[in-house]
Amino acid sequence: MILLRRLLGDVLRRQRQRQGRTLREVSSSARVSLGYLSEVERGQKEASSELLSAICDALDVRMSELMREVSDELSLAELAASAAASDPVPVPVRPMLNSVSVTSVAGVPTGRVTIKAPAEAVDVVAA
């Protein structure tokens, strides 16, 4: 059985470790006990949306990015479970995201903005 809390904890731990931060630093910034954050990272506790928001803020990560990574992990876990059971599960097709840099809109400078969107959803018009 795939446990969402375990996948979420794994992703949170990786995010924290990528930043080279300790549990103590993140727990202090998120205002959650070190022990509880540790249990969340190990998938032993279910994190509320409020707690996830505080942890994401402490890690300076958007919750949507966190959930996207969890979703990707869940898809892989489902595929692995399906392969083990030899009962094929259809794989959802997610469009490839392309980066588009925008320096002005209607002739007004915007600074540099990068947008990631499916290629077929973006019309680019050269000035």
Image (cartoon, rainbow, N blue to C red):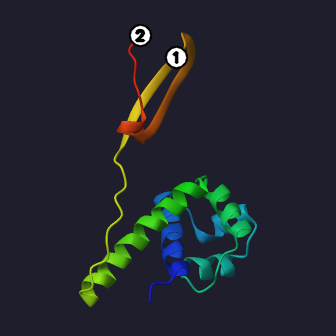
> Residue 120, position in %: x, y?
36, 37
> Residue 45, position in %: x, y?
63, 84
The mark found on residue 104 in the picture is: 1
Residue 55's quadrant in the figure? bottom right
Horizontally, is 43 left or right of 97 in the view?
Answer: right
- Asked whether residue 32 is in view, the answer is yes
What residue is drawn where x is 52% and y is 78%? 4
Contact flag, marks 1 and 2 (Cβ < 8 Å): yes
Where, quadrant-wise, is the N terminus in this rendering? bottom left
Write down the residue under mark 2: 127
User: Which structural element holds mark 1?
Assistant: strand
- Asked whether residue 20 is in view, the answer is no
Kind of residue sitting beneath label 2: Ala
Q: CA distance from mark 1 to mark 2?
A: 9 Å
> Residue 7, position in %: x, y?
48, 76
Q: Nearer the viewer, residue 22 or 50?
A: 50
Residue 127's quadrant in the figure? top left
What residue is drawn where x is 73% and y is 71%? 32
> Residue 9, position in %: x, y?
54, 75
